[in-house]
Amino acid sequence: MTNPTEPSARERRRRHRGRRFLVWTVIVAAILWCGYWYAASRIAEAGIGRFTTALAGSGRSVSCTEGGMSGFPLRLDLRCTDGRLDAGTDGISAALKGASASALLYQPGYVETAVTGPLALNSPALGGNVTAVWQEATLKVDAGISGLVSAIGNLSGFSLVPEVETVTLPLKQLTLKSGSFRLGPAGNGDYRIDANATDLAMARSTGPAFPPISTEVSVVAARFGSSTGLDPEKTLQNWVAAGGGIRVENLALHSGDISLAATGKLALAPTGYLSGRLALTVTGMEKLPDLAEALKPGSREKMTQVVGMVSSFMKPVDGGNGAREIDLLVQNGVIFAGMFPLPFVIPPVRF
């Protein structure tokens, strides 16, 4: 007597065919994925070959003591150890401890890169050797058929030291505790740019060292689009022609007891000049002449005059711990406090 709970012969055959189909599907998918990884690796190798050939054609060369490609099956990893660049007749050469790039094959267009110091740069234009070291330097890029969508970069523990004093780089050391930037869509067709630098300082060859400065920037390019497009310059030109609107959500500088922060709206003209209005809040305004003198010797008197003139248009911020604020007008790069132009001009944006 047949057990009613047992599957029939037809049902067993159906299940067997189902399992066999699943197995073959997995096998075919695996074979196709292997072919995809192999094709991607060959394309990458061909691209590197074209790059090195183009360099050689212009008298330049790039090499790695150790290099290779790995990452199968999900990534395509490229690495270069003890890389060297020789710029031929320019007399420029550079040596880098290591660099790597990793592309996620299941997310086309996404690439992560990391650079390991030190970097030794020799350039006649700089007057000699310059060495840069850092703790971390990374870049993450997400691009697609519409161009660059987003990018994130981080740098920490950075130090730049020239071997000898040069005219081009009159400094003993340049240091940065940390810095980062982020580009990406902000919704509603806007595009956001955020950046910051913490404790940027410079020891000059002569004179006092620059005081450590920290900055933050957060701006939104209104109606720019969700990517840079395949031709970023053309995309930028179209955006400028459409009005080039910029929302300044935060533009700040901090040094010791001094703090400046601006917000407002600007527009970028085809000439590259900015116009609009900014609300500026300043803390420690009486110490600005000292900061100006530290950054540019001989500028104390001029900054003292500017502070005296601007102060008459400023008003205290409620609960602002001595902070004062003022509305500034920007016309073609010239900054006005009330009816009076300040002796500072925002340089035009070149593109």
Image (spheres, rainbow, N blue to C red):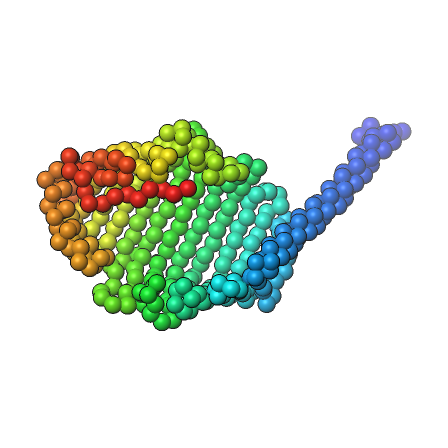
Is 209 on the left-hand or right-hand side of 130? left
248 or 48: which is nearer to us? 48
Task: In this rendered view, identify the residue nearer to me: 8 or 214.
Answer: 214
Q: Position of residue 104 (x, y in %)?
A: 59, 47
Would you identify the image quadrant in which residue 32 lies? top right
Q: Residue at x 25, y 51 (%)?
A: 254
Query: Residue 14 at what x, y percent from top left?
Result: 82, 31
Regarding residue 186, the answer to whether it shows in the image is no
Q: Residue 110 appears at what percent x and percent y?
A: 55, 45
The residue lying at 28 percent from left, 45 percent from top is 252
Q: Residue furthest front?
A: 89
The outermost residue toward the bottom is: 164
For the residue pair 254 and 294, the one nearer the viewer reads as 294
Viewed as shown, does residue 343 lie left or right of 46? left
Kindly tell me whether residue 345 is visible in this rendering. Answer: yes
- Residue nearest the observer in this picture, 258 or 126: 126
- Residue 291: x and y in percent read 20, 55
Residue that appears at 60% across and 60% down: 56
Residue 108, located in which quarter of the rendered image?
top right
| Vertical comparison of 351 with 58: above or below | above
Give the vertical position of 197 relative to 202 (above or below).
Answer: above
